[in-house]
Image (cartoon, rainbow, N blue to C red):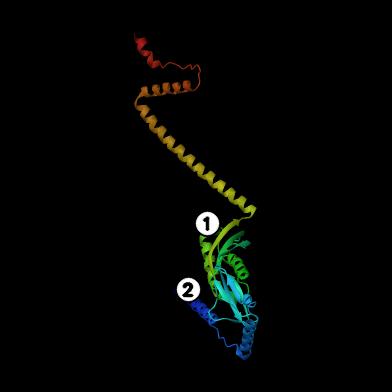
Amino acid sequence: MDDDREASKLRTDRRRQQQAALENPDNNIGLCGWVLVLFSILLVIVTLPFSIWMCIKIVKEYERAIIFRLGRILRGGAKGPGLFFIIPCTDNFINVDMRTITFDIPPQEVLTKDSVTVCVDGVVYYRVQNATLAVANITNADAATRLLAQTTLRNVLGTKNLAEILSDREEIAHSMQSTLDDATDDWGIKVERVEIKDVKLPLQLQRAMAAEAEATREARAKVIAAEGEMNASRALKEASMVIAESPSALQLRYLQTLNTIAAEKNSTIIFPLPIDMLQGFMKQ
């Protein structure tokens, strides 16, 4: 844990040094450079008011402009939002969108730790945190982040087995976010969120898992049925013990059963009359 904190601190310090070096560069453009700048300013003054439209630039609220003068970033870093001025012929600028960008990770076929091939895709949310680093440190920040997200997804899932991939999606997404955020820190990009969309299994594996789940449910059903039979037998045993204590209870139960049968269907029921009930008349 201490090593991770130390590494994170070193990365943060290095990024701050790079940012300071880019935002406060050495503006020594040389004698030839100053001659070109002065000539451009003179040309703007001579062609007023037409040249003013080439000098005034506007960037939106969600954009920042990186101005290059003779190939060097101007002191102060990104400009905007709002109105700023450039010198034609010697200055050019690049607009950087600071809004959150979303892209889909294409489905990746990954071999898991337990040698199962799965197809996984996801979504990444990121934004440009430092426009100067995003322009000066990498050619195409968007394309690089997309490729890095694909390789990170494959690397992270390669260390998990199938059960972990299906059940621990939040942990996998958090691990991917941390890895991507650390890797893109030098590019001035902040990875805000990573989500795993879908995990597709081979058809044969789906059938095997369905058969396994069905067998598990059948086994559980048999256990529940066996427990029910055991409880019913215990209840019947207790009922027989109660009936054995009172012989007349058996006759009452017999009559109650006949009454229940007659209530369901209208039918004629013939049953023998118990001899015990006729003994009293026979004695008389």
Q: Examine the rendered structure and indicate whether residue 262 appears above or below residue 144.
A: above
- Which residue is label 2 attached to? 4
Q: In which quarter of the image is the C terminus?
A: top left
Residue 93 image-quadrant placement: bottom right
The first of marks 1 and 2 along the sequence is 2
- 130 w.r.t. 125: above or below: below
Q: Which one is in front, 247 or 31?
A: 31
Residue at the bottom extreme? 31
Q: Nearer the viewer, residue 165 or 282?
A: 165
Image quadrant assignment for residue 120: bottom right
- The spot of residue 132 in percent (x, y) is 56, 76
x, y percent for residue 26 = 55, 86
The residues bearing labels 1 and 2 have C-alpha atoms spaced at a distance of 27 Å
Disc 1 crowd, CA 10 A, few/some/many (<14, 14-19, 20+): few
Is residue 70 in view from this perspective? no
Report crowding for label 2: few under 14, some 14 to 19, many 20 or more residues within 10 A (C-alpha).
Answer: few
Where is residue 54 shown, x and y percent of the image? 63, 76
Q: In percent of the image, x 58 and y 71: which residue is there?
A: 58
